[in-house]
Image: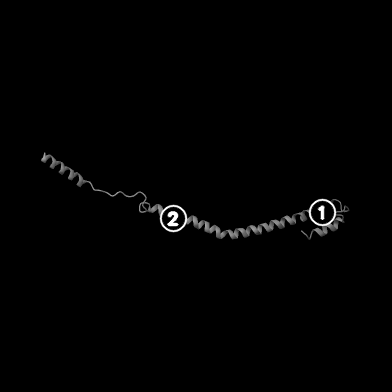
Amino acid sequence: MARAQAEDEEEYSMSQSGRRSKKKKSKNTISNKRMFVIQFTIGMMIIEIYFFANFFTQSSFLETCNVLGKELNMTANVEPFFWLSLNAQRELYNDPKRPLLLQDSYQVVRNSIPLV
């Protein structure tokens, strides 16, 4: 019995020496995810640069929109006078004696042309 116990202890010690105890690595360490962290940081920097660039360039865009708005306002104000002038000229060719705006048609055409 002593001999069987000694053999069991020998086998046990040999089986234990063949195994190396390894430390378990934690799953969420930064060293394991280094490339992911670098890529994520670079991606976030690119997104922030995009928004900063838009913030600084929006002032020129807004100035352009203001200029276009003023031009469209001017066009909307001038267009009725332009069409009045064209219609008065047509009416002058059709019937020169017919009054326009309760005035002589020739005088109306002559006064409306410089306004355009």
Quarter the N terminus occupies: top left
Are the residues at dot 2 and dot 1 in contact (C-beta closer than 8 Å)? no
| Residue located 60% across and 58% down the image | 61
Amino acid type of the residue that numbered disc 1 sits on in the rendered structure: Ala
Residue 26 in percent (x, y) is at 34, 50
Instruction: Determine the residue positioned at 82% across, 59% down.
Output: 111
**x and y, in percent, of residue 45 in the image:** 47, 57
Please report the residue visible at 65 percent of the width from the left and 59 percent of the height from the top: 66
| Element at label 1 | helix
Residue 113 on image: x %, y %: 79, 59
Bin the neighbour count of mark 1 within 10 Å (Cα to Cα): few under 14, some 14-19, many 20 and up.
many
Q: Tag on residue 65?
A: none
Q: Which mark is residue 88?
A: 1
Residue at the disc numbered 2: 41
Q: Earlier in the sequence, mark 2 or mark 1?
A: 2
- Between the residue at mark 2 and the residue at mark 1, the CA separation in whole angstroms equals 69 Å
Farthest residue to the front: give it: 1
Q: Position of residue 115 (x, y in %)?
A: 78, 60
Residue positioned 72% across, 55% down in the render: 76
* Three-letter amino acid code of the residue under disc 2: Thr
Q: Nearer the viewer, residue 57 or 13?
A: 13
Task: Nearest to the eye among marks 2 and 1: give it.
Answer: 2
* Label 2: few (<14), some (14–19) or many (≥20) C-alpha neighbours in 10 Å: few
Circle 2: element type = helix
Report the number of numbered marks. Answer: 2
